[in-house]
Structures are given as structure tokens and as C-alpha cells.
Image (cartoon, rainbow, N blue to C red):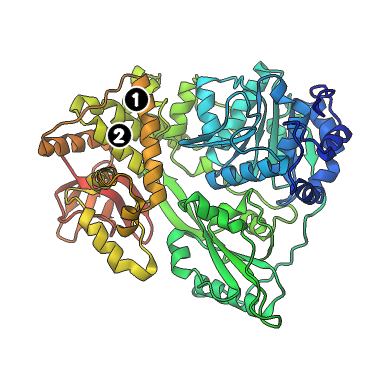
Amino acid sequence: MSQLSGFLQRKVTGKQARKALEHELNPFTNQPHSVQYKKILASQEKLPVYSQMDDFFKMFNENQIILIAGETGAGKTTQIPQFVAYSDLPHTNGKLVVCTQPYRVATVSVAKRVAEEMDVQLGRHIGYSIQFEDMIEPGTTFLKYMTDGMLLREAMNDPNLEQYSTIILDEAHEQMLATDILMSLMKDTAKRRPDLKIIIMSATLDILKFQRFFGLTAGTLAPLFKVTGRAHVVEVFYTQEPEPDYAEAAIRTVLMIHKAEESGDILLFLTGEEEIDDHDPDSVGPLVCIPLYPSLPPQQQQRIYDLAPTPRTPDGPPGRKVVVSTNIAETSLTIDGIVYVVDPGFSKQKVYNPQIRVESLLVSPISGASAQQRAGQCGSYEAREPEILRCNLSNIVLELVKLGVKDLVRFDYVDTPAPETLMRALELLNFLSALDDDGNLTALGSIMAEFPLDPQLAKMLIVSPEFKCSNEILTITAMLSVPNVWTRPPNACNQADAAKALLTVPNGDHLTLLNVYNQYVENKFDKSWLYNHFLSTRALVQADNVCAQLEQTMAKYDVDLLSLSDKKKLYQNIRQVLVCGFFMQVAHKEGEKGNYLTVKDNQIVALHPSCGLDTQPEWVIFNECVLTKRLYIHTVSVGP
């Protein structure tokens, strides 16, 4: 008999849960625990949140909506969903407990960790769902981790989210766009579904804004559960003066720590993949460096949990690993063994300017919130700027209209975006024929919203059969939806450039991406071929998965897969379809200096150095415009 057989839903106590946790049989499988279970449980019991289990169960059982605040490392992300599973007993009523994360890497890593802690199989009892990847077993999975964007897409087809008994929105302090919109939707859903429990979790203790937002009536505050205590003490040391080259100074600091400090691993923050590859300190002797950024293959991302190497000599420097990461290591990922954090204080952020419709990728100083979080998130800190106030909203606006939101300006946002940003999003969707002149969803817009894509890409896919090139547009869309397919190792730049030149189609980058995928298929998905041509295995495998999933959605809405045998006509039609989606992203050559002028907003731009065009045509169409050192257009093709 299962240890849970006598439990009453939402009346379980912490004492009952602890007894089930400590029993020799797994309460969810009724099988003996594995040999490592007791050791893992002992580490869980040391987490600050574990000692407050009784108080949590009481508050959870008595309230529909609760907020949880506690420092990073307190155990919120891994333990709270497990506590909920014991009280909510979702496996007994065919429902699930879901916990959202803002990043894909964290979603997968946390799901794997919780499966280990609960001593169950990942993909069966514990699952995860990220864009274009779903690892669950319907009817068996009772606890699911997923990205906030995926839950938002589910809400479009099921506004009441009936399959869930409890929804946990983690990392609310990050104020990511999808999380903020979900909070607004959950507030409304809770009124329609009194049986639904909602938990909002934050790594800042200052969450009065969220308490007010979720208060049952005006002027009241939602219940707050504070996780007290610290998993560790953090000392912060500052440089005496600003460093002219922050990355080089950070590397020097890592090496100084390795030579002079006691044992313990190091976490180094840099701004992006290119910077990490350029400055990653060499792995020598007892020092092993492990990069971490979103486009890394999953198996390489998991290396951050590897043990440090053994020291060479008893009297020499200790064995250490150095995790060199972008800001994805700020949230949800707790890496055992990290004792030292080296933080130059910069990150890359996309900032959208609605007046000129340009998304700028800027290296800028991080907020005090991020700095505290990187250091271990000790104490309270000020909030960072919500993503909804600094990004393009066209995708979210389409999803909200699909959800039935009539008045976008007066919608109950946690933080209300600028009206101009909303108007620009509505304008784009109207130009794409997703919305009519009154702001109502069109039949085309309804289908566009079903694709997990930016509206421009969705429009391209849907209209492509008219031009008899939907097979090719499907491939191009998939390739645009995955991380960069090209690799350029610092020690093999010339070879990588030569390999890229062999695959480049002179008419444009979109056709080059199509050629890369077709060559991959013709070479029978051979990974050695990818390696020899300096192509990312992860990106191509993911593109193949994206193709398969998008093809299913196309079939559901009768979007036929067609091709032309005449290659010249085919390429011309592909460029015409690109214009159907990206007609606002067309530029004309300006003068003899190689600059271009965007048609819509008269911005002077330049072709990015990665562009594969062999000439400078009069007209070009581009996928994105990004401001770094100057205003560049990326993924560019000759205009039709």
C-alpha cells in the first residue's frame, strides 16, 4: 500500500510528508528507493525551506493564492513543487502540478534534479516542456516544469488551464514578459476556477507589488510565505577602480583565486557566447573550464554539475572547475561546489525602440538586483526593469487577442507597457492581416497564433503554398528558430570560414540556411559531416525537430507542403514569400559606402559581417536589425 493512501488532498501536514519521504518505499512508485536516495534526501534536509515544511503546508492548504520569497539556494525551485505534489496529490485526480521557469536551460536542469530527488524517472513521473521539446508521459506525469512561454501558449487553447491543479510561477522577480502576462491571466483564472491553487515565487523579499496585485480586494495583500535563513554566507569584494578591459581583468582574478585561495569552484559571468569563447581560460592541470550559454548542446550544459578534477600534488593548487556563463546562471541553477563568483557587472540585453522598430543588443551594466543575485542573492534588493517595458510586444499582443482580451490598454498588467509600444505591435499585426482595422482577430490571425513563432514567420508559412514553396519556407523557418548553425572555434577561424563559403548561396542568407539543411539531409544526417563543416549538431538536430512539429500544425490547418522543380523560379518565389512576412524589414542601397536605408523608418544600416551576399544589391530584405557597435542588419537576402 502506498504511503500516500491515507492522505487527504490539501489537508496533508508537513509531518505526514516527512514520514512518507523517509519511508523505505517510494510513495509514488511503491518501489524500494535507490541506493543514492538517502544521501540526496540528507542534502535536501539542509535547505532553509525544508525546515519550514510545516508552515508551508498550512499556508498552502488554507489559501488559493500565496507568494513565496526567499534567497537563491534556499530550495524554493526544487522543494516547493515537491511539497505541493504531496498535498495536492495530482496523480490521484488526473491533474498536474506545473512550475514555470524563464529559461530553457533552467527548466531542463531543474526537472532532472527533482526527478533525482524524488527517485523517479524523468519523462514519466516528472517531466518538462520547452519550445519544440516535450518530455512527459500523459497519464503518468504529475509534476511538470516548463518555460513560461509554453504555459502561455497552452492558455490560448485552454484559458482555464483545466489540466493543472496548482500552477507555480517561479522567478517572478525576473519580470520576464511571459511571466508577467501569466500573472495577469492567473489572477483572472483564479476567479473562474476556485479549485485552482496559484503560487508566485521570487528571490527578492521585497514583493509588495505582487502582494497588492494578487490581493483579493483593493487594498488587501496576498499571503506571503517567507523562507528565512541563508544557505551560505557571502562576502563581496570590489576592485579598487574600474578596469579598462573587464573581461581580461576577470580572467586574471580567476587565475589569482586558483593560485592563492582555498578549495572551491568558481563561477565567472561574461556577456555572451562570443565573449565566453574568446576569453574562456584554458583548462590546465587541476583547473577545468566549462562554458555555459543557451546554444550549447544539452549534454555539454550538464557538465556544470561535474565534479572538480583532483589536485596534481598534495601541496599544489586544489582541483577546481570554472563555470564561465552568461546571465542564465543567475536564476534557478544552483551549482554545487561554487564558492567564488567573479562578476564584471555587465550583460547583454535586447532593448526595443518602438519609434524606429529596432531591437538593440547592448552590453550594459547590470542592475543591483542582478549583482546581488549573482553574488548569492543575499538580502533584499531593488527590482529590475520588467521585460514588458523594453521589448517588442507583437507576439504577446497576438496571443492576448487570441485569448479574448478586448482592451489591451486597460488590461490588468503587473506593469503597464508604453501605449506606443502596444500601438506599434497592433500596427504590425494589422499590416500582416492578423487583425482587422478594428483590432479584431482575423481568420488568418487565428491560425497565425497557433504557431509557436513570431507573427512574421507564421504569416510566411501560411501563405507559402500560394507560391508553391512551402517545403522550403518550412525549412527556412525552422532554421531561423534555432540557435546559430555556424560554429567558429577561436583556433580554427580560417577553416570555419572556408567551410561556410562552400555552403553559402550568393543570393542570400535565407537560401544559405535552406542549402545547409538540405545538404544535412542529403548526407543522411551524418554528424561527422556537420563537424567537418563547422556546423552545430545541436542546431541542426533541433531544426529537424522544429520542422516535424511545425509540419503537424500546418497539416492541422490544411497548409499544404509544395515545391517547384524550376530552381530559378523557386528561389524567386521564396524571396517573394519572405517579403510577405518581412515587408517592413526592407532596405535600399544608399550611396557608395555600402550603407542601406530602411524603407519604413529611414534608418541607416550596414550589412553584418556574417552576411553571405557576394554583392551589394539595390534592395535587400533582412530578418532582424540589431544595434551593437553600429546598426547592423542580420540574415539578409536579395530583394525580389
Give the distance between the C-alpha atoms of the residues marked 1 and 2, in whole angstroms: 9 Å
* Left or right: residue 540 compared with residue 187: left
Q: Residues within 10 Å of mark 2 (few under 14, many from 20)?
A: many
x, y percent for residue 175: 59, 42
Outermost residue to the right: 15
* Left or right: residue 540 compared with residue 312: left
**Which badge, 1 or 2, comes first in the chain's sequence?**
2
Q: Which residue, given by chain and number where applicable, does mark 1 sit on?
A: 554
Outermost residue to the bottom: 315
x, y percent for residue 583: 25, 36
The N terminus lies in which quarter of the figure?
Answer: top right
x, y percent for residue 62: 82, 26
Among the 4 quarters of the image, the one containing residue 85:
top right
Q: Which residue, given by chain and number where applicable, does mark 2 sit on?
A: 474
Q: From the viewer's perspective, is residue 185 above or below residue 639?
A: above
Q: Residue at x 30, y 30 (%)?
A: 461
Q: From the viewer's perspective, is residue 522 above or below residue 6?
A: below
**Numbered label tally:** 2
Callout 1: helix, strand or loop? helix
Q: Residue at x 81, y 23 (%)?
A: 5
**Which is nearer the eye, 300 or 599?**
300
Check disc 2 and give the amino acid type: Leu
Q: Residue at x 61, y 59 (%)?
A: 306
Callout 2: helix, strand or loop? helix
Q: Residue at x 16, y 54 (%)?
A: 616
